[in-house]
Image (spheres, grey):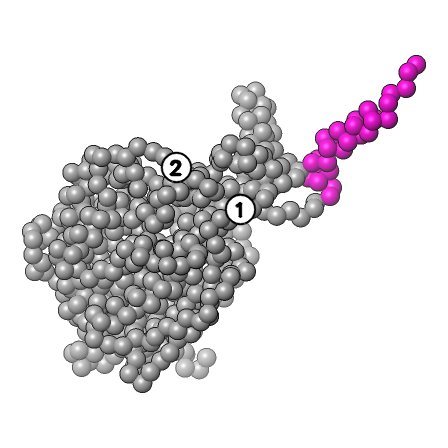
Amino acid sequence: MRKKPTYDIILFAILMVLSFLPLLQQHLLHIPLKPLHGVTIEEKRPDFNLESYRSGDYAKQEETYLSQHFGFREPVIRLYNQYLWSCYRKTYAHDVLAGKRGWLYNPESVSDYYGTELLRWQHSPEAARQRFDREVKYMNWVREVLKENGIELLAFIAPEKSFLYPEYLPEREYDTTTFNASSYFLRKFEETGFPCIDMNGYFELMKDTVSYPLIPQTGAHWVFPAVYAADSLFRYMGELKGIELPKLHIGALHENDNHGADNDLEQLLNLSLPIRKRNGYSPTAEVTVENSPTSVKPKVLFVGNSFMWGIVNHIPLSEVFDEVEFWYYFSTAYFGEGLKQTCPVSDYNLGEKLLHFDYVVWFSTGNQMNKGTMGFAPSALVNLVVDDSTKMAYVRCIADTLTTDATGDERFKEALSYLMGHPDLIPELQGDSLYIRNSELVYVPYIREIRRDSVWMAALEVQGFLRSTSLWRMLHVEIDRWRANRMLYRDQQAEIAFGRQCLQEVEALKLKMLDNEKSMKAVREHAEKYGKTLEKALDDSARWLIRRKYHLDSCRLADNPDAEIPIPPDFQSK
């Protein structure tokens, strides 16, 4: 019998190794691999049962699971993506569009340049004009109310890559039936006298004077050039109030060794090899802040998109401002040191929160402006000029007309959201002038004063527990007492001491409930019924039980603000 050539055996051995290597890596080797960039929805392995097997659902679910968990998945996907990119300039990344000479763009930005993005968000050009006109009117009204309280509202427009570097865009046809949203807003801001600083023109002038791209070849956002834009913004803010903000000093430029934000689009391609950069390096420099005896550090709120991170990452904002907060897409609030803490913007009392700052800066980029102000202008207006009782009356009317399956809290939330987006449902906001104000704005200066006193705030939190109400409501009734020269809840020390003991008992009870399966079953049912997290349902249940133990239902704030807390006679001896 003829012996097989040696190379056949070698090829067969290599083929077997390649065939079984992914299986070995998946189950035995567990070699750490560089993760893929982008969002991955984790698929769970399906449970096998006869019914799903017969219907074919099990096979489909198992196939989906295995496609996400086979061995060496990451390098295999990168290799395939590299093949598509190198041979065809093709990518399956939905958020990346390939331009000329290796330039990458955000698809929405390209569509905005060619005039097709507007109709993704608006029914027609005429409907868009009507909506944008309303939004500009609302922005001016919000500014009017804020300015009455010593706060400046201004707009800040970041540059758009497609308009800054159109020479590398993929070829498309223009839609001549639409208009550019950013240009329309800027013209309306100028006509109405609304303060706005537009960085598109500034960056277009800079473009031919620098040796590096102002927005990177393979990135979607500005990186270090955000510092120049911020410097212009800070100077403009100072001019609006007639004050001097701390000044930025920019050191010598040098190449940035940390390539992250400057290739965020390239990362989404998940290639094996980096794309060749043809237009210079990505710069960086040391940025320092100079405070003079006359400079002022104000409180500032930014409301906008991801271009803000370019400013946050390169400027020590804590040295420029006394306090900074960033509302990302008017959805998530970032605050605290380094903007590391977060909470939903919906958790705030919007009217009160806006009046906490010295400046409110709304900013966007061209393609984002097709969506208007991201809900900021109408929501801010309603909360600044309409009393809560009036607002809730409109919400209840809207909830009664909704034709959805939602019930209870969900129906209320839908109605509230609809009102926040349509202030013209309120008759007083249908005209061309603003003549109403939220009467509760008078509380804001007092709230600022109380919030500076941590002991006072802690006392009101305790009183809020004893009187079955929110901290927000306790603040308002405390201010009513303050203005009427009545005894404050803060000064009722016996009640506060008893309340602290009650809250300690709440925490102890929560630990006991966690160890009791019957109690936790009731808590889970409560959480599911009322749409709460398990932690929130547990805390509410424990608080309710302790209130019931000490008969605190008889002293609800809503029933009697002056009710005495039923402190047990033996409390002092504990």
With respect to residue 187, does 250 lie above or below? below
Question: Which dot marks residue 214?
Answer: none
Q: Is residue 115 magenta?
A: no
Q: Position of residue 229 (x, y in %)?
A: 33, 62
Q: Amino acid at mark 1?
A: Arg
Q: Is residue 100 left or right of residue 430?
A: right
Secondary structure beneath dot 2 equals: loop
Please state which of residues 210 and 14 is positioned toward the viewer in this rendering. Answer: 210
Mark 1: few, some, or many residues within 10 Å (few <14, many ≥20)? few
Q: Is residue 308 left or right of residue 24?
A: left
Residue 317 visible at all = yes
Q: Residue at 25%, 54% (x, y): give it.
A: 376
Residue 456 visible at all = no
Q: Which range is magenta?
A: 1-29
Q: Residue at 33%, 67% (x, y): give it.
A: 231
Secondary structure beneath dot 1 equals: loop
- Quadrant housing the N terminus: top right
Q: Disc 2 and disc 1: Cα gap in Å?
A: 18 Å
- First reached walking from the N terminus: tag 2 or tag 1: 2
Q: Residue furthest top?
A: 1
Residue 309 sits in quarter: bottom left
Q: Is residue 305 left or right of residue 19?
A: left
Q: Which residue is mark 1?
A: 276
Q: Give the overall secondary structure of the magenta segment.
A: helix
Q: Residue at 39%, 70% (x, y): give it.
A: 317
Please state which of residues 274 and 401 is positioned toward the viewer in this rendering. Answer: 274
Q: Are marks 2 and 1 in contact (CB under 8 Å)?
A: no
Residue 470 sits in quarter: bottom left
Q: Residue furthest right?
A: 1
Question: Which dot marks residue 170?
Answer: 2
Q: Is residue 25 magenta?
A: yes
Q: Position of residue 232 (x, y in %)?
A: 30, 66
